[in-house]
Amino acid sequence: MRKLLVCAAPLLLLAACATQPADDLASLSDPGGSSYGLFLAGQSALNDGRGAQAAAYFEQAQAGGAEDELISERAFTAAILAGDITKAAALAPSGEGSSESGKRLGRVVEAVEAMSTNQGKAARALLAPEGMGFPHKGAAALLGPWASAMAGDATGAVVRPELRNDKVVEYFGLLGQAFLYERAKRYDEAETDFKALTGGENPGDLVLLAYGGFLERRGKRLDAIAVYDKGLADEPSNSTLLAAKARAAAGKSAPPAPTLRQGAAQALMPPAATMLAAKQEQIGLAYLRLVLRLDPNRNDAWLMVGDLMETAGDLDAAREAYAKPKPGSPEYAAGRAKLAWSYLKAKDNETALKMAREAAASGDLDSKVTLADMLRVNEQYPEAIQILTEVMAARPGDWRLLYSRGVNYDRAGRPKEGEADLRAALKIRPDDSEMLNYLGYTWIDRGEHLSEALGMVQRAAASNPKSGAIIDSLGWAYYRLGDYKKAVEKLEEAIELEAGDPDINNHLGDAYWRVGRRDEAEFQWKRVLTLDPDAKMKAEVSAKLASGLGPMGPAQSPRVAGP
């Protein structure tokens, strides 16, 4: 797994991590003996994404008399990543020996801490452009108007933030301005901003929900429904938009406008997402922790924190984050799904299924879909089919549901029904690489529609050439068609993409055998046994190795995305 790596200057985009001397590694097992040992232990915990433990080690190092500014900056970093923003603000770097990046982030952290305690004037001063620079200038610019509003500066609050060549600040600064215009009761100007944000072809549910909520608060329920329908035309199964439309149609209370702290939290979400998209996980996580200091009930931020913690290998912290959304919230189903999947990935299938069943019992459709996925992974296909059929009655024409039910039909030994669902799904999404791969492979495995099937798998591979699973399917298709030389070529390509996949190694072994490369075939099969294959594959490979007769029998079933 990718770790949340920490370098000498905290949260820098470009810096080289120092290599720990081998002689010092022993002190990690007993860090209490020296400040340096505590520093090393803190560094190790920070590299592993264990922010709370890292913060404790660095604090002990400082308590032991260590005054090194590097340790202070690491303690500051660890406090942020652990979510202790109050402590991080107290540790904010400011000395001459501190890194510029650390100082800039320190100002943002101090400003957020000030805003969380309604000290708008202090926050506004800390966020001043002259004291800010790369890579935190955009975050500071988006926070600035909310700090001005908190400071009572009505004029500064509605000044749209600008940052040269920064599209994120340009777009989301407009969203913040719309909310602050509404707060100032300048409704016409607010609506002008909202219309500008939602006027494109695919504006996204964030701004659609914002504009729709504004219209509901203004008593324009029919206009709000039209805004929600615009989003649902692109995403008919979007549960958040569906819930908003149902609320407006029923005449229920409109969602409240964001408070100043909630607005500031929302302003930090786009910079967080931008950093995560750029693979800058530490800065992204730091921003998310700041979001949650301002708005502890920001469920989408909790789910993103959970994903980061799970990637870093801290399952306890990930599960704690996934459990934050409460029943009835729009993010509850997603949180429960992520929580259940975390247990499934840890091979605790019983707990995973139990949690998925509990969530589905609420009647939430997304939770039912998650349960169906869990049942598929556990090979309980008939129940999965039943659940998906129920959901499809409420969501007709959803290609994802058709695809999922088609896979379950196929795995349950009902191929004709599976093919019908897959054909229907492909009619809606004719270029989807996963579905092209699945149906094409299925036909090749059965010896049906071979020319069409090969074309489908080739299209899938052309669309997604970096998918080891799809390139494997193409290679296996050539194998089943008897073109073993071409099969070897494609399967070697697939194994370069996913070297640790038991299916690919098994297929490559079979292809090697067919072209007379027997020693290499046996090597691949032996490797399969080291890659945790399922019981069926383990028995098949063991039989090939024991008999010395090579591959026998039909190809395996096509694979689908997911665990």
Image (cartoon, helix red, strand yellow):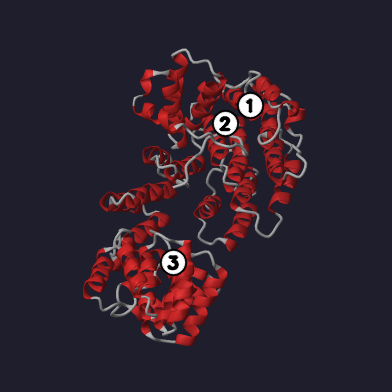
**Is any part of residue 44 visible from this angle?**
yes
Of the two numbered discs 2 and 1 on the same chain, state the one appearing first in sequence.
Answer: 2
Mark 2, residue position = 10
Q: Residue at x 35, y 49 (%)?
A: 340
Q: Secondary structure at mark 1?
A: loop
Q: Are marks 2 and 1 in contact (CB under 8 Å)?
A: yes
Mark 1, residue position = 99
Tell me residue 153's x, y (percent). 73, 25
Tell me residue 457's x, y (percent). 49, 76
- The answer to whether residue 383 is above or below residue 98 is below
Q: Are marks 1 and 3 in contact (CB under 8 Å)?
A: no
Would residue 374 be found to the left or right of residue 219 on screen?
left
**Is any part of residue 389 visible from this angle?**
no
Q: Quadrant of the C terminus?
A: bottom left
Of the two numbered discs 3 and 2 on the same chain, state the one appearing first in sequence.
Answer: 2
- The answer to whether residue 544 is above or below residue 313 is below
Q: Residue at x 27, y 69 (%)?
A: 541
The CA span between labels 2 and 1 is 8 Å
Q: Secondary structure at mark 2?
A: loop
